[in-house]
Image (spheres, rainbow, N blue to C red):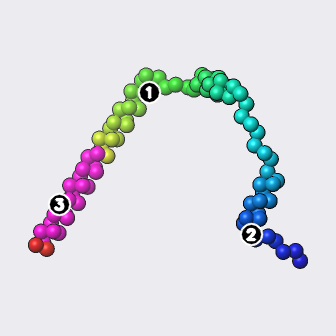
Amino acid sequence: MAKKETDPKAAAKAAAKSAPKAEKVKKGGLKKYFKDLKSEIKKVVWPSRKQVVNNTGVVMTVMVITGMFLFAIDTGLAAVIKALLSIGS
């Protein structure tokens, strides 16, 4: 029965030898990137002004409700801690 290698260093060396070498970056890569970026931006379906205003209203409402909830929790916990500290003194 053949014994398998359990040494991680030997396994890493074997994997490195079998892996293909990295290709060099082509010149003009930045130009191609921006060209591709422009074509992808054209594919985006942008929301209408009405949708943006509606979504902004929803986000603001949720933020206000969450802020009020956290304020209530903070105030309540502060009162509990204050009461507990006053019992000890």
The x, y position of residue 21, in whole percent, is 78, 45
Left or right of 67 in this view: 49: right
Q: Which amino acid type is shown beneath numbered disc 2?
A: Asp
User: Magenta stretch containing residue 84, yes or no?
Assistant: yes
The x, y position of residue 34, in whole percent, is 62, 25
How many marks do you count on the picture? 3
For label 2, the residue is 7
Left or right of 1 in this view: 12: left
For label 3, the residue is 79
Q: Nearer the viewer, residue 10 or 62?
A: 10
Residue occupying image coordinates x 77% and y 65%: 10
Q: Is residue 43 visible?
A: no
Q: Give the magenta part as a residue range.
A: 67-87
Determine the image quadrant of residue 87.
Answer: bottom left
Q: Is residue 34 visible?
A: yes
Q: Which amino acid type is shown beneath numbered disc 3?
A: Ala
- Distance, label 2 to label 1, CA atoms, is 59 Å
Look at the picture and state if 7 lies above or below 19: below
Identify the mark nearer the N-term, 1 or 3.
Answer: 1
Left or right of 72 in this view: 59: right
